[in-house]
Amino acid sequence: MIRRAVVLVILLGFGAARLPLEHKLFAEHQRLHFRQVEFNQNLREQIGQLGFVAALSGFRSLVADAFFIRAHVAWERTEWGRVLLLFRQATTLQPRSVLFWDMAAWHMGWNASVAALNDAAQPRQALRVKAQREYFALGKDFLERGIRNNPEKPQLYESLARLYKDKYNDHARASEYFAKAAALPGAPSYDRRFAAYELSYTEGREREAYEELRRLYDMGEKERLPTLLNRLKFLENKLNIPPDQHIPEKALQAR
């Protein structure tokens, strides 16, 4: 009984000592938006028994890389179901890898969707289009979950913006995500321009787009690229901007 009491006191003391450290570590993970992998039955079902054991043994990164390589091999064989499964496994194990999320979305939203639409084995066009849209949705899901795990990285916002632009023809959402990317540290300067370009194609938001494009134009020569000038000229005509407020014709001619 005395020995048990001593052990209990030691355990309680050890636990009390760990609490401040664990709280500090949890707060740091939240600050960094780090979502830890939960080693539970759901993870085991997703990555298989051997992968689960390897991950438990501290080889999570190595296992994720192996899944990524196998996904590439499956892509070369156009085994789209296997590509999807392997990328789900890789992103589950390494949720902070922007590359894994981005590549998964690209394979689903672009490669697999094109293959589905051109599937000679499916004679019904309606079913091919349905399969194509399902792959669009899978690509979008990868990017949305990638952003939740990496909210501070502009690359995934850009990729989601391109998906909305190229696959959904949704210029408003494309503009929204280019703008979100532009607001993040380290984002390339073109994100802000792309956000304005997409807004200029959005019905009912032409005035907002014009004002943003004009602000960019007024920032100087470096921003006066051909697409920006062409979209500005289009909006000047559509919005009936007074001629004395138009950008000079020589600016267009110079490009």
Image: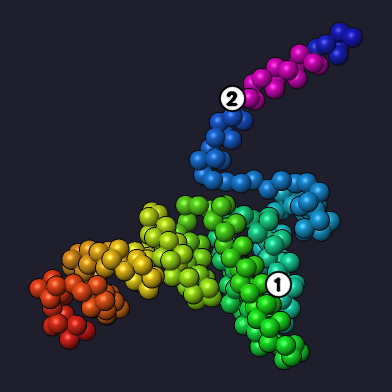
Counting from the top left corner in percent of width and height, residue 191 is at 37, 65
Taking the spot 54% from the left edge, 75% from the top edge, the residue there is 167
Residue carrying label 2: 20
Expressed as whole percent of the image width and height from the top left, the position of residue 51 reads 78, 57
Q: Which residue is drawn at 48% across and 61% down?
A: 157
Q: Name the amino acid, label 1.
A: Val
Q: Looking at this rendering, what residue extends furthest in the right direction?
A: 1
The secondary structure that dominates the magenta segment is helix
In the image, is residue 248 part of the stretch drawn in magenta? no
Q: Name the quarter where the C terminus is drawn.
A: bottom left
In this picture, is 8 found above or below 251?
A: above
Helix, strand or loop at mark 2: helix
Q: Which amino acid does label 2 sit on?
A: Pro
Q: Which colour scheme is used?
A: rainbow
- Residue range corresponding to the magenta coloring: 7-20
Q: Earlier in the sequence, mark 1 or mark 2?
A: 2
